[in-house]
Amino acid sequence: MNRCSRCTNLHRMTQATFSDSPSTLFINGRWEPAASGAVSRIHNPADGELVATVSEAGREDTERAIAAARAAFDSGVWSSVPAPERGAFLLKVAAELRERREKFARAESLDTGKRIIESRIDIDDIAACFEYFGRLAGQSAGRVVDAGDPTVVSKIVYEPVGVCGLITPWNYPLLQAAWKIAPALAAGCTFVLKPSELTPSTAILTMQLLQDLGLPDGVANLVTGPGAQAGAPLSEHPDVDLVSFTGGLETGKRIAAAASGTVKKVALELGGKNPNVVFADADFDAAVDNALNGAFVHSGQVCSAGARLVVEESIAERFVDELVRRAQDIRLGGPFDESAESGPLISAAHREKVDAYVQRGVAEGARLRCGGAAPEGEKFDAGFYYQPTVLDRVQRGMSVVVDEAFGPVVTVETFRTEDEAVATANDTIYGLAGAVWTQDAGKAQRVAGRLRHGTVWINDYHPYLPQAEWGGFGQSGVGRELGPTGLGEYQEAKHIYQNTSPQVTGWFADHGKEK
Ligand code: NAD
């Protein structure tokens, strides 16, 4: 690791907004400290080094941010900008993100511990997301409806939903935020963003970028801080019209329950326990390699991770042997370690949770084929690393098979028939993503059609497209991000019905006239 260049980079960041008495709340176009003066420190999970000190918002700060977003929305300062111009603004955001790519990527890597190469890919994906919604904005002027009466003009127009509360997790901090910010701005909404308290840095940089590009005050607001204080008002407050949340299932339930008090629109992107189904006729090498990627990219801290390998019994032994051999070879290291192929987990508490799932699985009878512990060695001492872990001989119903461990852990189940493969893959309360591997095109389509998951890959794992909807069946969520539906989440459909030739209806007799 090149410590000197990292320190220089950190120093530049701290000069901008990260100091011991930071002002990282962005409210109505101004950078402010928390009203309480509270701050929290962000540490790099790869080595524990201090990365940033940020303001820790409380309820009153979030309420101020909501008021700013409400006033900006009601003033029409953004919603009345013609949609193609809003789109052009998003294209400028994308271009500027590409300009500032390295700065954003480094900030993302320092907060999350993920490899810099992965963060650069994330920033490219984020720019592509802004470009997609930038082009989509203004493409639809609504819909003319045939009322069946030539004297009636009936049309559907799509209007911004209003003030949006955007709450995001730590695994892909800015990517998950961009999936919300870009369509919200394209639709003409205003918003308050509450990023994970563990990874706020790129959200702060994004607000700076939006300010630099001249977004009107109050359209974009940011509160940094913990969920219960800084985030909760976004789901409860009557002035918030929509809350869009990405995170864990239990938090999602709490947010949906809180949002019901004011019947606001709710969009939820929650966890997954995603099956990767491999038939015996699959391309063996490609399937093993992608099973490895599916399970262990970003140390398995991916909502769509292929954490359940469901493999045809006739090839299971050879397949798992090969998977284990490859998993044991994965090189762990910090974000700037060029030899590293995967990084640490986000925190000590999270590593304990992942390990508890593994140990419980073993206690319940699963066979530990590799991993199951933190790696040894000085370079790992200060970080939250966990070895890639494979468990076979698992039983359905074990918590390591049922619950989202959200770490580098893959379980192996086997099947004999196509029906059994589908039943196993669908045996989850979640339904975010899954994959099927086979060289039989008919079987691939049949199985893909029967999987109750929001994304199904055939002979691949993990790719997504900004123009294709993303979201979950079952308890993986409500609503969709990306694609045209992802814009629709931030719009209300309004029916405008105009009678161009008003007539007396005669429904009620005019009794006064009769007299
Ligand atoms: P989390 O639920 O702990 O936290 C997510 C966000 O919610 C954070 O910003 C947190 O501060 C906030 N929060 C917590 N309690 C809150 C409350 N009462 N009110 C308002 N906000 C509150 O999730 P996490 O650990 O940050 O992220 C990991 C989870 O995210 C995993 O379950 C993963 O599957 C999921 N995820 C899903 C997708 C998807 O596309 N479906 C994408 C990424 C991550």
Image (cartoon, helix red, strand yellow):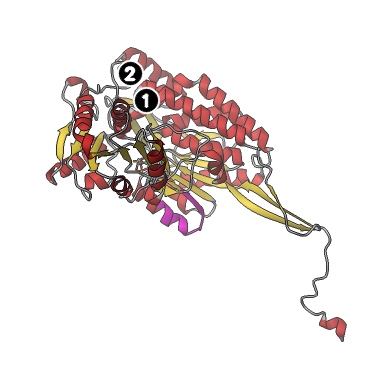
Q: Which residue is mark 2?
A: 336
Q: Which residue is mark 1?
A: 109
Residue 204 percent across, percent down from the top left: 46, 31
- Give the CA distance from mark 1 to mark 2: 8 Å
In this rendering, the answer to whether 303 lies above or below 42 is below
Is the distance from the Cβ of mark 1 to the nearest ligand 1 atom less than 8 Å? no
Q: Which residue is depicted at the point 19% across and 43% down?
A: 394
Residue 497 percent across, percent down from the top left: 73, 57
Q: Is residue 385 left or right of residue 70?
A: left
In this rendering, the answer to whether 266 lies above or below 174 is below
In this rendering, the answer to whether 126 lies above or below 154 is above
Circle 1: element type: helix
The quarter of the picture showing ligand 1: top left
Amino acid beneath label 1: Ser
Image mark count: 2
Neighbor class of circle 2 (other Cα within 10 Å; few <14, some 14-19, many 20+) is many
Q: Quadrant of residue 415?
A: top left
Circle 2: element type: loop
Residue 207 percent across, percent down from the top left: 51, 31
The reply to whether residue 304 is in sight is no
Tell me the quarter of the image containing the N terminus.
top left
Do the residues under discs 1 and 2 have CB atoms within 8 angstroms?
Answer: yes
Extent of the magenta region? 255-267
Residue 275 percent across, percent down from the top left: 32, 41
The mark that comes first in sequence, 1 or 2, is 1
